[in-house]
Image (cartoon, rainbow, N blue to C red):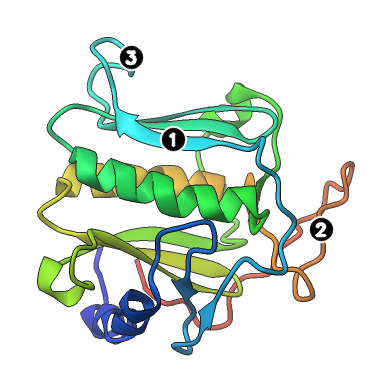
C-alpha cells in the first residue's frame, strides 16, 4: 500500500501538544485532525469493557499470521501479535490508549459471532482506521504510539522500530474489515448517533477527506 507521507508528516506535527497534555491516565488525550485535543469527559463510563494488546504464546494464533484478534460479544477483546513482530512496549502502549477509548464508549463493538469478523472485507469504507509506521523522532518523547482521530477516522502513528512492516500490513487488513465494514464503530456523542440494535443499515458515512490513501 502506498502512503501519502505528506499527510503523515502533518499528523506528526500535531502530536507535541498531546505530549504536553499527557496521554496516560483515566482521562487520556487524543488529537483530532484540526490539532485540537479532546478528553473522555462527556463519554459514558463502562469499566466492564476491556481490551488487551499482547505478545501471543506459542500456538495461540494460527501459523503464518502475525496478528490476530480474539473478540467476544460485550466488548472483551485481545489483540495478539506473533513473537518478533511487535514489541511489548508497543503492545502496552496500545492497551493503555485503547482502554480509554472503549471504557468511555467512543468506540464500540457491533457484531455477535466470530465468523462475521473473519469474513473478507466488503470494502464499505464506513470509517477509516490504519497503522502508519513513522520514525520515532517524530513522536512525543517517551511515546511509541499516538492516535490522531477525527469524525470518521483514526490513524495510529507507530514507532517504526517497534513493529514489523508485515505486522502493520496485517493489522491494516484486519482494520479494513472491523472498522471499514462497521463491526467496530465510532460513537462521538452529539455528533454520531448510537447504533440501533436491529438496524441493518450502515451507521457511518465515509469521511469526506481521508487522512491517508491506500
Q: Earlier in the sequence, mark 1 or mark 2?
A: 1
Q: Secondary structure at mark 1?
A: strand
> In this rendering, which labeled residue sits more in front, label 3 or label 1?
1
Quadrant in which residue 63 is drawn: top left
Within 10 Å of disc 3 (Cα), the crowding (few <14, some 14-19, many 20+) is few
Q: Relative to residue 113, is residue 93 depicted above or below?
A: below
Residue 147 percent coordinates (x, y): 40, 66
Within 10 Å of disc 1 (Cα), the crowding (few <14, some 14-19, many 20+) is some
Q: Relative to residue 75, is residue 90 depicted above or below?
A: below
Labels 1 and 2 touching (C-beta < 8 A): no
- The quarter of the image holding the N terminus is bottom left
Task: Kindly give the residue lying farthest to the top in the view shown.
Answer: 59
Q: Separation of disc 2 and disc 3 at Cα?
A: 34 Å
Q: Earlier in the sequence, mark 3 or mark 1?
A: 1
Q: Separation of disc 1 and disc 2 at Cα?
A: 24 Å
- Left/right of residue 125 with respect to residue 7 in the rendered view: right
Quadrant in which residue 159 is drawn: bottom left
Residue bearing the label numbered 1: 52
- Say the numbered circle drawn on residue 194: 2
> In this rendering, which labeled residue sits more in front, label 1 or label 2?
1
- Left/right of residue 129 with respect to residue 104 in the rendered view: left
Amino acid at each position: 500500500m502506498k502512503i501519502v507521507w505528506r499527510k503523515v508528516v502533518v499528523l506528526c506535527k500535531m502530536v507535541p501538544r498531546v505530549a504536553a497534555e499527557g496521554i496516560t491516565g483515566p482521562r487520556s488525550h487524543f488529537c483530532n485532525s484540526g490539532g485540537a485535543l479532546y478528553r473522555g469527559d462527556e463519554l459514558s463510563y463502562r469499566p466492564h469493557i476491556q481490551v488487551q494488546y499482547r505478545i501471543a504464546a506459542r500456538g495461540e494464533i494460527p501459523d503464518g499470521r502475525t496478528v490476530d484478534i480474539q473478540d467476544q460479544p460485550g466488548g472483551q477483546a485481545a489483540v495478539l501479535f506473533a513473537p518478533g513482530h511487535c514489541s511489548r512496549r508497543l503492545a502496552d502502549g496500545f492497551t493503555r490508549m485503547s482502554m480509554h477509548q472503549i471504557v468511555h464508549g467512543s468506540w464500540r463493538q457491533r457484531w455477535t459471532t466470530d465468523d462475521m469478523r473473519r469474513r473478507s472485507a466488503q470494502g464499505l469504507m464506513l470509517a477509516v482506521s490504519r497503522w502508519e509506521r513513522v520514525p520515532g523522532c517524530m513522536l512525543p518523547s517517551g511515546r511509541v504510539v499516538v492516535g490522531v482521530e477525527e469524525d470518521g477516522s483514526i490513524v495510529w502513528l507507530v514507532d517504526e522500530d517497534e513493529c514489523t512492516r508485515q505486522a502493520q500490513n496485517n493489522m491494516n487488513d484486519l482494520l479494513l474489515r472491523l472498522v471499514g465494514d462497521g463491526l467496530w464503530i465510532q460513537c462521538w456523542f452529539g455528533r454520531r448517533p448510537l447504533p440501533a440494535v436491529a438496524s441493518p443499515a450502515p451507521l457511518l458515512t465515509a469521511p469526506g477527506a481521508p487522512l491517508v490513501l491506500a
